[in-house]
Image: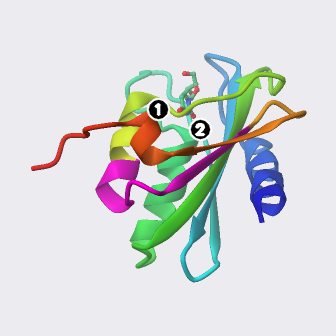
Amino acid sequence: MKKELINKAYEAMKHSYSPYSGFRVGAALLTKSGKIYTGCNIENSAFSPTCCAERTAFFKAVSEGEKDFSAMAIVGGKSGETSEFCYPCGVCRQVMAEFCNADFEIILTNGKDIKAKKLSELLPESFKL
Ligand code: THU
């Protein structure tokens, strides 16, 4: 399952629209029912409208009625070079915390090794209203 999710993230990275940073990211989000939603980063010349790959995937899924998630794979790097682990930014971690439990799994790879982190490790004591 981890491998399949990672492969989907690599596929999504091909669609990255990142002409300003050159940093290409792909994400693949697994629902508890076994569906996969993918996303890439989509940049904008005004910079702040840029959306990360992770949030693209979450917003696609939530907008189609999904709310139960078990894992997300993320790959990325400068010019699509993915030899380093690509951790999700703080904003995307907060979006994960909105929809996912502490045991939501974040799967990362540097092309050689695979790391799996719990959301509670990447965003402990997160903000909740
Ligand atoms: N980016 C992501 O897609 N996900 C992250 O978690 C961090 C950053 C994107 C946003 C922007 O297009 C580029 O990487 C450089 O910040």
**SS for tag 1?**
loop
Q: Would residue 127 appear left or right of 62 to someone viewing this image? A: left
Q: Position of residue 46 (x, y in %)?
A: 42, 21
Mark positioned earlier in the residue sequence (2 or 1) = 2
Tell me which amino acid carries mark 1.
Thr
Q: Is residue 116 magenta?
A: no
Residue tagged 2: 41
Residue density around tag 1, few if under 14, some if 14–19, many if 20 or more, within 10 Å: some
Residue 92 in view of the camera: no
Residue 120 placed where, x, y %? Answer: 40, 44
Q: CA distance from mark 2 to mark 1?
A: 7 Å
Q: Which residues are magenta?
A: 96-108
User: Mark 2 near mark 1, Cβ–Cβ under 8 Å?
Assistant: yes
Secondary element type, mark 2: loop
Quadrant hosting residue 109 = top right
* Residue 50 image label: 1
Visible residue check, residue 10: yes
Image check: 127 left or right of 129?
right
Q: Does the closest atom of ligand 1 sit within 8 Å of the Cβ of label 2?
A: yes
